[in-house]
Amino acid sequence: MSQIREQWGSKLGFILAAAGSAVGIGNIWKFPSMAGENGGGAFTIVYLACILIVGLSIVVAEFVIGRKTQLSPVGAFEQLAPSSNWKWVGYLGVAAAFVILSFYGVVGGWILKYIIDSLSGGFAIVSGNTEASGTVFNSFITSTFSPIIYQVLFMGLCIFIIVQGVKGGIEKWSKIMMPLIVVLLGVLAIRGMTLEGGMEGLSFLFNPRFEDLTASAIVLALGHSFFTVSLGMGTMITYGSYLNKKQNLVTSALWVIFLDTAIAMLAGVAIFTTVFALGANPAEGPGLIFVVLPSIFPQIAGGAVWGTLFFILLFMAALTSAISILEVVTAYFIDQKGWSRKKATIQFGSIITIVGIFCSLSLGGGINITGFLGMPFFDFMDYLSAKYMLPIGGMFTAIFILKKWGLSNYMSELKIGMDKMELSPLLVRSLLTIASTIVAFIIFNEIYFEITGKALIG
Ligand code: PHE
């Protein structure tokens, strides 16, 4: 416990690290396919509203709690509300980190494999044939060893970065990878728009088709706004705990949200322009990235290069998110148990990798573990975290401020570093109240659906 707490090296470093956590598979894989299936621009509008109301207020809340206590979630809640049950919100976060990283690491592995396939010209055999591409993808993810080897490699890289610490690991790598992600995506988006027929992809993504926007799509947008900004499990508390008092937490949060949203949109542009130019099916859903894209890249001039660049940028986005998840676990063992960074990271990174192996195997590669609710263990871990753990964690964080810590204590920490910027306590209270109410309703709706088979909305 006697270790001196690490700090970010610069304001920009912190913003890029936090944005690196936010920008991940969720932006490039999940958002475009969700928007594609659920009304294009109509979905995007709802998503933006969710991010601005719910996302923004909870990102700021997490930063404030982290910076105030200089501790990761469990210790932070314990310090602000000693001898109470609030520390369980912190434990829920640590548990969520285990759950998310176990399946996230598996997808990270798939991405690594696709970089290699694209580089070696392996997409050529599925050129123009989505069905063949689907078969290749399925036989890969349902095989026993190959996905595990890539997953272990991906997790090894995460552990390698986290062992190097906050400034020397997370910040250093985020500063390299985040600008690269933006540049590569920008290039791919321009490439897509200049393909013949590519512009149609833009109208697919941005023209609102309200008739396709169902109530369940609205629920989906809300749930996704937690996942995409890494909320509700203390990632942003942990990152905020390495801050000094000079940072303006509101502008930092705005930057993180802006970058997260801009990158999701840019990914949508890059993907849909290409999909439309080649006449592929835009509403493919989750198969868009691993099935449709590999079948269309070989049809574009220089396709192997574009494909490789795409999977490299997806890999970097996944890695900067995965490290932030591992950091929550590592920070817990450093702060609460007094462990060294190296020991905490290696031990728990390995345990998460092992849980991840079971996720991978549950897709068909051997042991048939059907989790609860009859889903493969992999899907169950995704479902459990995105639908319950993150929203519940986020909701309790907002309630904690309103009901336990107190708005005035919260505001006095929030104001530090804001210079002349003014914030009305009434506005802050209203946003936190709206956020927690909406989220409570969504969670209730989900549980009601699981029990009765009918949702109140959606
Ligand atoms: N925000 C990440 C993404 O969009 C996922 C993530 C969730 C990261 C929760 C950290 C914590 O892919």
Image (spheres, helix red, strand yellow):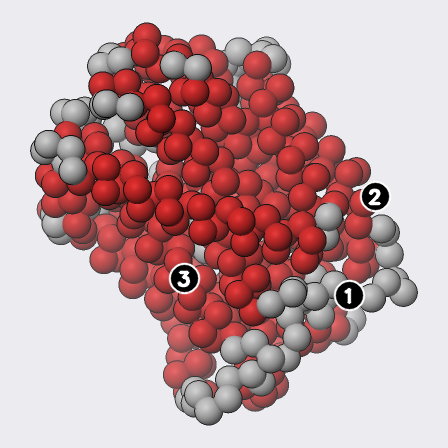
Q: Residues within 10 Å of mark 2 (few under 14, many from 20)?
A: some
Asked which secondary structure carries label 1, the reply is loop
Label 2 C-beta lies within 8 Å of the nearest ligand 1 atom: no
Counting residues from the start of the chain, the first of labels 2 and 3 encountered is 3
> Can the viewer see residue 291 in this picture?
no
When the figure is inspected, residue 435 is found, relative to residue 273, above or below; the finding is below
Few, some or many C-alpha atoms within 10 Å of disc 3 (few <14, some 14-19, many ≥20)? Answer: many
Q: Which residue is mark 1?
A: 5
Task: Check disc 3 and report the residue beneath it.
Answer: 257
Q: From the viewer's perspective, is residue 242 above or below residue 230?
A: below
Q: Earlier in the sequence, mark 1 or mark 2?
A: 1
Task: Choose between 199 and 433: the one closer to the eye.
Answer: 199
The image quadrant of residue 282 is: top left
Q: Is residue 351 left or right of residue 383?
A: right
Tag 2 and tag 3, C-beta contact below 8 Å: no
Task: Give the label on residue 343, or none.
Answer: 2
Marks 1 and 3, how far apart at CA:
27 Å
Going 41% across and 62% down the picture, which residue do you hit?
Answer: 257
Query: Image point 53% across, 32% down: which residue?
Result: 108
Mark toward the start of the polypeptide (1 vs 3)? 1
At 22% from the left and 14% from the top, the residue drawn is 128
Q: Is residue 85 above or below residue 112?
A: below
Relative to 246, residue 22 above or below: above
Marks 1 and 2: CB-CB under 8 Å? no
Amino acid at circle 1: Arg
Q: Could you tell me residue 57's position as x and y percent? A: 45, 70
